[in-house]
Image (cartoon, rainbow, N blue to C red):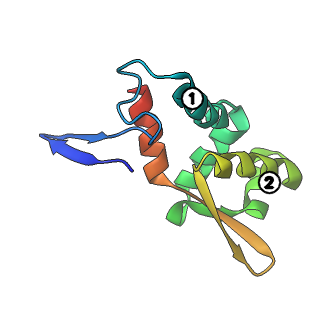
Amino acid sequence: MPTATSSRNTVQVAGPACCPSGLGSPIDRATAEELAVLLKAVADPARLQILALLRSLPNCEACVCDLTEPLGLSQPTVSHHLKVLAKAGLVASDKRGYWTWYRVLPTRLGELSAVLA
């Protein structure tokens, strides 16, 4: 779980549980493999577009059907990318009637940024 501390105007967020100090110190192979899953999830243009689009929407959430047109991708393709993002813990989903809604998990994005900082 990340920790946030404020020092003047700077907020520091710890990295993910696998490497809370980010890449500031050596990591073992298991840690590198866990971190690679997270980094691979965002190492795709469509998934980066999905994250940016979700973050721009109210409550940072949308239904798959609302993402296909702006991305220019089919529903199965968008669903696949959302599944990868969910597996990495970057988005969560809620079933609402027939539709599944996805929302960004800002804490996890903060962890990701802390690794790369």
| Disc 2, SS | helix
User: What crowding class fits label 2: few (fewer than 14 Cα within 10 Å), some (14-19), or many (20 or more)?
Assistant: some
Residue 115 lies in what quarter of the image? top left
Residue 23 location in percent, x, y?
41, 23
Residue 43 location in percent, x, y?
65, 30
Q: Nearer the viewer, residue 24 or 42?
A: 24
As drawn, the label of residue 113 is: none
Residue 48 location in percent, x, y?
63, 38
Extreme residue toward the top, this view: 26
| Residue 51 visible, this orientation | yes
Callout count: 2
Above or below, comparing residue 82 to residue 14 in the picture: below
Q: Which residue is mark 1?
A: 30
User: What crowding class fits label 1: few (fewer than 14 Cα within 10 Å), some (14-19), or many (20 or more)?
Assistant: few
Above or below, comparing residue 96 to residue 77 in the picture: below
Instruction: Left or right? Give the position of 4 relative to 45.
Output: left
| Kind of residue sitting beneath label 1 | Ala
Select label 2 or label 1 by which is in front: 1
Q: Nearer the viewer, residue 56 or 60?
A: 60
Extreme residue toward the left, this view: 8
Instruction: Left or right? Give the position of 20 relative to 102.
Output: left
Residue 7 lies in what quarter of the image? top left
As drawn, the label of residue 79 is: 2
| Disc 1, SS | helix
| Kind of residue sitting beneath label 2 | Ser
